[in-house]
Image (tube, rainbow, N blue to C red):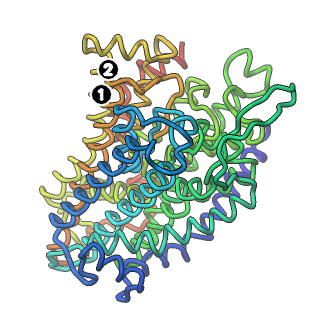
Amino acid sequence: MTWLPAALPLATTALVVALLYRPLGDYLAWTYTSPRHWRVERLVYRLIGAAPDGQQTWRAYARAVLVFSLVGVLLLYGIQRLQPLLPSSLGLPPVDEWVAFNTAVSFVTNTNWQSYSPESTLGYAVQAAGLAVQNFASAAVGMAIAIAIARGFASRRGATIGSFWVDLVRGATRVLVPGAIIATIVLVAGGVVQNLSGFVDVATVSGATQQLPGGPVASQEAIKLLGTNGGGFFNANSAHPFENPNAWTSLFEVVLMLAIPFALPRAFGRIVGDDRQGLAIAATMAVLFVASAAALTALETAGAGTAPQLAGAALEGKEQRFGVVGTALFGTTSTLTSTGAVNGMHDSFTALGGMLPMINMMLGEVAPGGVGSGLYGMLVLAVITVFVSGLLIGRTPEYLGKKIGPREMKLASGYILVSPSLVLLGTALSFALPGVRESVESALANPGPHGVSEVLYAFTSAANNNGSAFAGLTASGPWLATALGVAMLLGRFVPIVFVLALAGSLAKQDAVPRGSGTLPTHSPLFVSLLTGITIVVAALTYFPILTLGPLAEGLR
């Protein structure tokens, strides 16, 4: 296959995202900096007892995030366990306690890991009132954290970083709800299902009878992608024709996943008063994204092996309506944005091709990352980059006029270490603990290196709040459901606390005058340094375990 057909979907996506970069980024900056409150927002503030113009220290902001999320976990767990008592439950029983815990944690942490078959486990009430609500809430939380650290850089000797409640409400009412409504209309026009009908008996081509579910699919599909959540209404996720009917809806869904994460750097530049800083962050994200998409497309198109070569590409696990290129682009996007949605089966990718989505998550999902989480993750890496650069030239490092001292580096280092620790520890315990190993091995569809890859992928997905999976792993048992749930919780909220503490530390500082030795953080040199640091941090951490899984399988 020539590179022109392979490059067209990527080029089209890049053009649309580039056109959205400035207007959407400016709108996001206005959303969080406007002094005016909408009437509906004031009503919400009164209901929850929040002051519209209140300010919080980083500790108060962090407490608000944790309390709000804990309440979300408890409510979603309760809704699942009480499913038979709810309307539109379709006669389905209560969700198993282990699966209910895992699912509640998953959706509140913006992971949307699903260790169950949605259409046969959850009724419409749980889908709409439980999962969809958390899709809005968790995405709004991520954007709020990103804005908080942006305020930390912009503040001068300040003690506060804004109000979590105001940021949460504004992100939902001004960005996510209107964006999801527009996306829903487009998806319905493209053929995505949106109704409240139950299971319908239809006659197949062969004359047999099959039950097909309906449901409010398009509305949940819209927010799952716009909010980089990822949980599908159906077990096949975006490979299901009711969720993703054709090639252009698949491309539209890719744009939905990328729109806000790529626009947030522009909002960051507006808030700190230097558009070039946002452009440098966005450029770094774009370099990593294009490189990953090109590599995965090349590996899946080449398709090492007799069967793939005879077929012209590695076609197993891919829908013909999307093809290899469309599947590779979607897989790259979903694993670089923390969305976790799939329009093909990652478990069926080639050995080295399946490693690419894993590496995308291991990078910290910062290219461009989830809504909010991608920006604040990249800013932490930028802090590390200027610190390393400062050591090289013998100067006190500074970023956007703020000195990067021991406290800032401890917080940034803590952030970087959380995810690898959870991934490596979770994978190691799954194979090392007596009793646990047997249960994990029985949950694997494949032994040997590919089995290691399945477990490694699961903990990488959970700790980085992605939610995609290698389909060969059954993760509904007590150990995996609990361990992955804990990885999701710690992988989401421990880094958030580090980021908010960093925001508070930066906010207290005054601006440092630029000198002749100050590293320009808007230049191509900085983009190169930041790209290199991002790759090195992940590569050196995960390379040993990759040699036991996908590399061992792909090179043997």
Q: Are marks 2 and 1 in contact (CB under 8 Å)?
A: yes
Quadrant that contains the N terminus: top right
Q: Residue at x 70, y 32 (%)?
A: 301
Question: From mark 2 to mark 1, how far is it between C-alphas?
Answer: 6 Å
Residue pictured at 67% horizontal, 57% vertical: 252
Q: Nearer the viewer, residue 121 or 270?
A: 121
Residue 344, placed above or below residue 196: above
Left/right of residue 95 with respect to residue 272 in the rendered view: right
Tag 2: amino acid = Ser
Q: Residue at x 37, y 86 (%)?
A: 37
User: To which quarter of the image does residue 180 belong?
Assistant: bottom right
Q: How many marks?
A: 2
* 239 vs 282: above or below: above
Rate crowding at label 1 as few (under 14), some (14 to 19) or many (20 or more) other CA atoms within 10 Å: many
- On the image, the x and y values in percent for residue 204 come to 83, 31
- Depicted 373 relative to depicted 207: above or below: below
Tell me where residue 258 sits by quadrant.
bottom right
Quarter of the image where one finds residue 294 = top right
Q: Position of residue 277 (x, y in %)?
A: 40, 70
Horizontal side, residue 122 vs residue 541: left or right: right
Left or right for 525, reference 392: right
Density class for disc 2 (Cα within 10 Å; few <14, some 14-19, many ≥20) is many
Q: Residue at x 87, y 30 (%)?
A: 205
Residue 549 shows in the view: yes
Q: Residue furthest front?
A: 85
**At numbered mark 2, what does the secondary structure look like: helix, strand or loop?**
helix
Does residue 395 appear in this view? no
Q: Residue beneath label 1, please? A: 426
The residue wearing badge 2 is 430
